[in-house]
Image: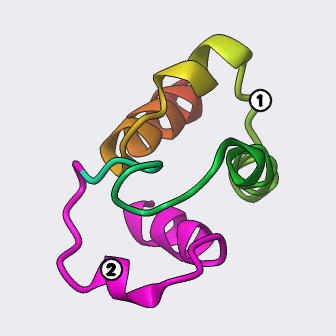
Amino acid sequence: MEEIIIDILKKYTFDNKVWENFNANMDLKNDLKINSARVVDIVLDLEEKFDVEISDAEIEKMKTVQDIVDVVGKLLKK
């Protein structure tokens, strides 16, 4: 699942160098340079790929790559 999420995130990063020292605790905005408009697109991609619905409250929790993995994982277990 994490690899799929990373592939989705890579579509929304303009500088691939940010992935050279990747770790799951990288911050979406500060480390990966993903802005809030692109977060909306990422959420739509995640919802489509994993057939889940991500609430606004869950989106607010998604600050790092690991946060996204945790949110999607929790939704898949429902």
**Secondary structure under badge 1?**
loop
57 part of magenta stretch: no
Relative to 32, is 76 on the left or the right? right
Quarter of the image for residue 59 reads top right
Q: Pointer 1 and pointer 2: residues touching (CB < 8 Å)?
A: no
User: Which quarter of the image is occupied by the N terminus?
Assistant: bottom left
Residue at position x 46%, y 42% in the image? 68
Is residue 24 rendered magenta in the image?
yes
User: Label 1 to label 2, Cα distance in Å?
Assistant: 27 Å
Q: Position of residue 29 (x, y in %)?
A: 47, 48
68 lies above or below 7: above
**Residue at image x 42%, y 72%?**
3
Magenta part of the protein: which range?
A: 1-25
Q: Which residue is mark 2?
A: 19
Identity, as a three-letter code, of the amino acid under mark 2? Trp
Give, as a three-letter code, the residue at label 1. Glu
Q: Is residue 57 left or right of residue 67?
A: right
Number of other residues with Cα within 10 Å of mark 1, as a class: few under 14, some 14 to 19, many 20 or more: some
Which mark is drawn over residue 53? 1
Residue positioned most to the top: 57
